[in-house]
Image (tube, rainbow, N blue to C red):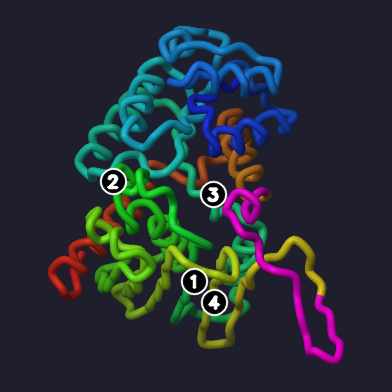
């Protein structure tokens, strides 16, 4: 069975998902829509498909599913529209920036009965999945502490900051989801501190560029998250998990896994410098998981409830910074 998918949004993440869809033998990209006609036409031409409007795609019985890669403030409305149209829906994170709006959207999804998946791509990174598999196999015993390091090479465009939802909802939300994925137990407390150290104007825009977050479960398991919008040495993505029997870690990835030793010492190639190059495999496997779920081959791996839970943690972290205290969930 071939799943016919329309792409909503022809920006950089839309381009990533278009490539993933086109490379999957169980799917076919059938249409592209974007508010910027030239962007839609270029991406559609790259894959030999037609452009269409949102309304045309919703009404088209030859479209089985949509991948929503549009700006965040359009996500919830589009999810509801295509759920009511009976299409399977994949949507990039977050569902919305407001928790109540997310709940309203998920009610519509539930009432429609369509398949819905949220795009938390890091769950599908082969290295992080191998780490999760080792945990599930009991290789390190009972998880006690998780340390997640997530640092970007540089700031996003400043014009993006006001509409991003802020550091916790835009960047750390991936780490909140990864913490839930790895620990497998609800968090009951959140404590966060955040600053504008990379660029003071970020604070003037009401946001932060540097943060440290602590999450605690009812049993006392702890997760620490270190975020920064500046890593001069590359895209820093590491996870370390300790248990009563040992430790397991996922190291940074590089274009080439080699090490050179000479009179100057030991050197290795630089890290990847962008999420689109670091997580190529994750995006491919994420879309593959959605397509498999759409055909009934497997259950949805990242649900709307997962998207809501990550947003709740982001909101708690924001409140912790604002009130300078630990927040009970």
Estimate the spatial distance between the alpha carbons at disc 2 and disc 3, rounded to whole Å.
24 Å
Mark 1 lies on a secondary structure that is strand
Q: Position of residue 29 (x, y in %)?
A: 64, 22
Q: Which residue was labeled with disc 4? A: 240
Q: Which residue was labeled with disc 2? A: 162
Badges 1 and 3: C-beta atoms under 8 Å apart? Answer: no
Badges 2 and 4: C-beta atoms under 8 Å apart? Answer: no
- Which label number is shown at residue 149? 1
Looking at the picture, tell me which residue is in the foreground, 207 or 325: 207
Magenta segment includes 164: no
Estimate the spatial distance between the alpha carbons at disc 2 and disc 4, rounded to whole Å.
32 Å
- The segment highlighted magenta reads 259-280
Q: Nearer the viewer, mark 4 or mark 1?
A: 1
Query: How many residues crowd around disc 3 within 10 Å: few (fewer than 14), some, or many (20 or more)?
Result: many
52 with respect to 194 (left or right)? right
Q: Decide which of tag 2 and tag 4 comes sooner along the chain.
A: 2
Q: Which residue was labeled with disc 3? A: 121
Q: Position of residue 262 (x, y in %)?
A: 86, 87
Q: Nearer the viewer, mark 1 or mark 2?
A: 2
Q: Nearer the viewer, mark 2 or mark 4?
A: 2
Query: How many residues crowd around disc 2 within 10 Å: few (fewer than 14), some, or many (20 or more)?
Result: few
Q: Residue at x 67, y 22 (%)?
A: 28
Magenta segment includes 263: yes
Query: How many residues crowd around disc 1 within 10 Å: few (fewer than 14), some, or many (20 or more)?
Result: some
124 with respect to 254 (left or right)? left
Q: Position of residue 165 (x, y in %)?
A: 30, 48
């Amino acid at each position: 069975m071939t799943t016919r998918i329309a792409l909503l949004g022809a920006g950089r993440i839309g381009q990533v998902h278009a490539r993933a869809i086109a490379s999957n033998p169980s799917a076919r990209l059938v249409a592209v829509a974007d508010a910027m006609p030239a962007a839609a036409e270029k991406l559609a031409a790259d894959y030999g498909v037609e452009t269409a409007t949102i309304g045309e795609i919703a009404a088209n019985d030859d479209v089985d599913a949509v991948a929503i890669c549009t700006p965040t403030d359009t996500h919830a409305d589009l999810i509801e529209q295509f759920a009511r149209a009976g299409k399977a829906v994949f949507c990039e994170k977050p569902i919305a920036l407001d928790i109540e709006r997310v709940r309203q959207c998920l009610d519509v999804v539930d009432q429609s009965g369509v398949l819905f998946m949220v795009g938390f791509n890091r769950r599908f990174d082969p290295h992080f999945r191998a780490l999760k598999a080792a945990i599930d196999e009991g290789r390190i015993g009972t998880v006690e502490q998780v340390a997640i390091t997530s640092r970007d090479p540089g700031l996003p465009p400043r014009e993006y900051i006001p509409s991003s939802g802020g550091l916790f909802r835009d960047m750390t939300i991936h780490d909140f989801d990864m913490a839930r994925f790895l620990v497998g137990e609800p968090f009951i407390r959140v404590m966060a501190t955040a600053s504008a150290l990379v660029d003071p104007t970020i604070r003037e825009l009401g946001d932060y560029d540097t943060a440290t977050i602590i999450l605690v479960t009812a049993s006392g398991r702890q997760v620490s998250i270190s975020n920064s919008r500046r890593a001069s040495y590359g895209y820093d993505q590491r996870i370390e998990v300790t248990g009563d029997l040992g430790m397991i870690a996922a190291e940074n990835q590089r274009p080439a896994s080699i090490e050179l030793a000479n009179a100057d010492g030991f050197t290795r190639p630089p890290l990847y410098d962008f999420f689109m190059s670091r997580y190529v495999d994750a995006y491919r496997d994420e879309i593959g998981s959605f397509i498999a779920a759409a055909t009934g081959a497997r259950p949805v791996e990242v649900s709307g409830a997962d998207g809501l839970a990550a947003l709740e943690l982001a909101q708690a972290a924001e409140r912790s910074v604002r009130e300078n205290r630990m927040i009970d969930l």
